[in-house]
Amino acid sequence: MKKYILKRMIIMIPVFIITSVIIFSIIHLTPGDPARVILGDRAVEEEVTALQEKMGLNKPLPIQYLEWVTGIFKGNLGESVYIDQPMTVIIVNHMKPTISLTIYALLIAAGIGIPFGILAARYRGGILDHAVTMVSLCGISVPNFVVALLLILLFAFHVHLFPIAGYKALKEGLGIHIRYLTLPALALGFIHMGLIMRMTRSSVLEVLNSDYIKMARAKGVGEAAIMVRHALKNALLPIITVIGQTAVTLLAGAVVSEAIFNIPGIGQLVVTSIERRDYMVIQAVVLVIALINMFLMLGLDILYAAVDPRIRLDSR
């Protein structure tokens, strides 16, 4: 297992290099002079030149990239032109709401999707199966912002059960923190809940048609034991895959929910930084999200190997 984990971690090194080059290239090769955009059209040439020197934009692109990457390994992610705070503080402050929203949405999606997917497979062709299929299709088909607006209209405007928008940090109390995040988490997790439902149903159905399940039933094993100990255990790999992909998608796709519900998360920071052409912030945020996704995939690979030892043997 240690060799398997070490091999996966070594593979992450070239992935990091390629990712950092792509992020740096896309941002720096976009048309327009960042210093000119930041200072405005009325700025004199001396001011533009001074800002270019401060941001390091007057150096060749390879030198800029090497200085940026070297600074990352030293813990320096750059400096924002507009926000007078260390980059790590800026990212952490905006990452906290996004991570809370992502975890809450993932718990909703997996906590509802997996049990109902198992029940739909267990009672295939029944009323519950048709209901789960209909809900999952709605979740996959309806856009995120439409679900968000419907939830606001129903649970915030008419029922007054949740606030319409805003955010309260965890330090102000767990209850009020969850209350403000419930509607955006439901809106964000609804589409992925449908996807997890369908994947769980199809995976469990495939396992239920296996010979060893028929043998277990012939031996008189109860249906509950068959579903939990045999069917679900052997259907975990595709379910784990879709949950891992869901976590990555939720983290990157929280921008819409944050915009609708006015949550000061990482998506809002990226949008604001793009409008300002605050390159250092954009680079740092996108790289941090990419690194989080890389470590999520590493954790997913380790979980694969723990669930199915054959994966470790194949990698040898």
Image (spheres, rainbow, N blue to C red):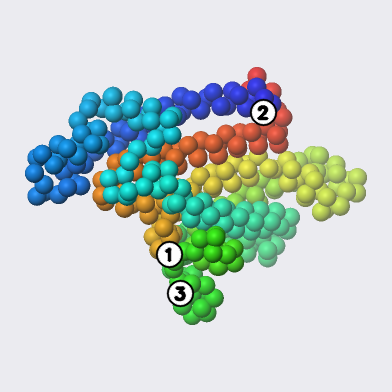
Q: CA distance from mark 1 to mark 2?
A: 42 Å
Q: Nearer the viewer, mark 1 or mark 2?
A: 1
Q: Look at the numbered disc 2 and give the secondary structure of its residue.
A: helix
Q: Is residue 59 rendered to the left or right of residue 144?
A: left
- Residue at 33% across / 41% down in the picture? 79
Chain-order first, disc 1 or disc 2: 1
Q: Quadrant of the C terminus?
A: top right
Q: CA distance from mark 3 to mark 2?
A: 48 Å
Is residue 173 visible from the viewing direction of this image? yes
User: Which amino acid is tagged 3?
Assistant: Leu
How far from the left and from the top, in percent, is residue 85? 36, 47
How far from the left and from the top, in percent, is residue 86? 38, 44
How far from the left and from the top, in percent, is residue 249? 49, 47
Would you name the residue on which mark 3 appears?
A: 153
Chain-order first, disc 3 or disc 2: 3
- The quadrant where residue 302 appears: top right
Would you name the residue on which mark 1 appears?
A: 261
Q: Is residue 148 rendered to the left or right of residue 3?
A: left
